[in-house]
Structure formats: structure tokens, C-alpha cells
Amino acid sequence: MDRISINQPIIGRDEKIAVMRVLERKILTSATELGGNEVRSLERSLKTYLGCKHVIAVNSGTSALYASLLVLGIGPGDEVAVPSFSFVATANAVLLTGAKPVFVDISENSYAMSADDLQSKITPNTAAIIPVHLYGHPAEMGAIRSVAVKNGLPVVEDAAQSVGAQYQGKHTGTLGDLGCFSFHASKLITSGEGGAIATNHDELSDKLRRIRTHGIARNGDPSIFGTNLRMGEVEAAILNIQLKRLTTFLDKRRRNAKELSHLLSEKRGVILPFSVKGGSSNWYLYTVSLDKARDRVLAKLNHMQVDARVYYRIPIHRSSFYRELGYRGESLTRTEHASKRVISLPIHPGVTLKQIRRIAGILLTVVQ
């Protein structure tokens, strides 16, 4: 019985050829403000795809978040509103600047940040908002942006999981002041590691290009604080090919999601994935919520060689590290409810319709 992975990189001959061309040129990276040839090509292609003015490639999604907060001047004494129902990097990027993460509950209509709870968490020290487009589903950006405008706050989108997803006809990552993407090996398109920042702000773009290379300007002067957040030429070369395949990847994920939803649609106790009004998912993860027996279903799927997983069993504010930092009294009811019930199923482009039917069949035999 073949094992069905939760996600897997799909690397072909074209990616290998692109890597060899970089190796033959023997220019593996560039310390210049604008980056190397492959990096610049990737930034141009992503800018066109996303429909934004600027894209700055970096070496990870975490670096994208960190650099975005730095360019906004966020630091000690500031608070940044983030969801707890996310990968820990969302909050850790805030800590890297010396600022304090303030955890916001998720919405009843999605697994993303609740605009109502967000408003209740705003204080005079709040300096930015980081909504997360979790599982590839867009957050309710209309409501979140309204809170941001009302309070005069910048929005940094954590779009690490949502390349290709849209909200009201615009790509996630282009709806706030800055949008952060990840190209980790588990993501829709990948270079192993890698990230990017999208923005329509000219001044922020110029500063970000310096921040990613130790703050050094074109004249060689380290004019602002920065560090080494550069993407290498090999990674950019792989992504230049992967980006051309993104539409095909999205089509296959949507096909698999549609079939799985059809097979599970009439089963009581199984809440299917949902997108907010005006949202279009990239189906990074197909996540269902089970009224009961979540861990029994997970164990059965894993036993039958289906790599289903729970994202995120332990919300960030409940993790050991954040509890040591003093996060103990937060009341995030919907976050904790979801963490006890969600399970993510494989639907990546390498999963066949036959395997989709196998996944659904196993789940349905356990959920009675």
C-alpha cells in the first residue's frame, strides 16, 4: 500500500536544468541590493502574477515577516496582534524585533483572525496587525482592514500558506501594506527554503532590499539596520520554474478538494472546509473539523498509510515556550475548540482521485 504524504515537492526536469545552469555560471548569490539575475527574474514574475508594484525575495517566510516588521519600525515596547491558531513563526517574528505578540481569537466563519476580537485587543501600544491566511483560505480582510484603518495600523499579511488564493478578486499578500510568502518544501511551490514580500509602497520596498543585505545601500554604505536575509540563485532558479507550474498545481488541488468534499458532504459530524465570502482558497491543506473521535480517525488514517496531520494541536499561546513567557490567562475559546477537532488530509497534486476515494473511505468507516 503506497503512503500518501500530506504534502510533497513536485520537482521535474526543468527545475534540474535550471539549477545546473546556475551552477555552471558559478554565481550562486549576490550581495548587491538588487540581487542576482535569477532573484530579479523571480521578483519580476511574482510581481506580475500577484498584481503588485514590488516583490522582494528573501530566504524564508519567517525572514519575510521579520523584515516586514523591521521596515515598519516595530520594536521594544510595541504590541503586534497575531492569531494563536497558526505556525509559531508568526509570533516568533514579532519576538525577534523585541515587540510583544498579542493573541487574537479566530472567527466563527473561518480559521483566521476574528475582526471583532482583534478590535478588543487593540491598545495604545498596538503597532501592527498580522492576519494569517490559514490552510490557504483567505482571512476576512475587509473587516480586518476596517479595524486597521479605524486605528491607524499597518497590516502585514502572513500569506505563507496562501500563494494563489484570492479575496474579492485580489491575491492574498496584496491586501495589506505588506504580504509575506513562504516557499518551504511543504508549500504549493517550493525551493526547499525561501520567501518573498509583496508591497505597493515604494519607500518600504527600497528599505526592504537593504534590510535583506545588512542594510547596505547601492553606494556600499550600511545606511540602516539589516542582516543576511538573501535568497540564493539556486533557490530562485527553482522557483522561476515552479511559478510557471503554479496554475496546474492549483487546478489539481481544487479538483481533489472538490471530490473529497463531495464524498464527505453528507456525513454528520464532519464539518467541511469553508472560505469566507469573496474568498477563493488555494487548498494548501484540506482541513475538516470532527465533532468527536478526531484522534481515533487520525490514528486509523496514519495506520493505513495516509499522512493526515493536525495543524495546530497546541495553539501558540498554549505552547511551553510562550507559557514560560507569561502567556497563561488568554481566553481564546474558538482557537482552543478548533485545536481539539481539526484534521488535515492530503490533496496535493500528486494525490490521485483513486487515493482521494481511499482517504474518504477510511475516514467514513471511523466516523459513525
Image: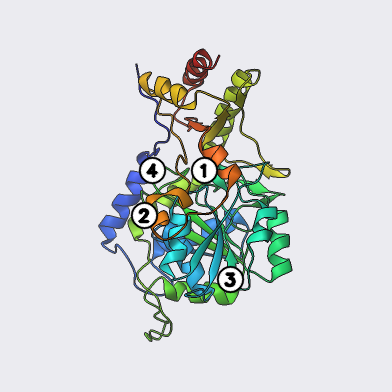
Few, some or many residues within 10 Å of mark 2 (<14, 14–19, 20+)? many
Q: Position of residue 75 (x, y in %)?
A: 48, 74
Sequence-earlier tag: 4 or 3: 4
Please name the amino acid that badge 4 sits on. Answer: Asp
Task: Return the mark for residue 127.
Answer: 3
Q: Position of residue 96 (x, y in %)?
A: 41, 67
SS at badge 3: strand
Sequence-earlier tag: 4 or 1: 4
Sequence-earlier tag: 3 or 1: 3
Q: Which residue is mark 4?
A: 14
Q: Quadrant of residue 10?
A: top left
Q: Which residue is mark 2?
A: 235
Q: Quadrant of residue 334?
A: top right
Q: CA distance from mark 2 to mark 4?
A: 13 Å
The residue mark sitting in front, 4 or 3, is: 3
Please name the amino acid that badge 3 sits on. Answer: Ala
Q: Specify whether residue 40 is in view.
A: no
The residue mark sitting in front, 3 or 1, is: 3
Sequence-earlier tag: 2 or 4: 4
Q: CA distance from mark 4 to mark 1?
A: 14 Å
| 4 to 206, vertically: above or below | above
Q: Which residue is mark 1?
A: 246
Please name the amino acid that badge 2 sits on. Answer: Glu
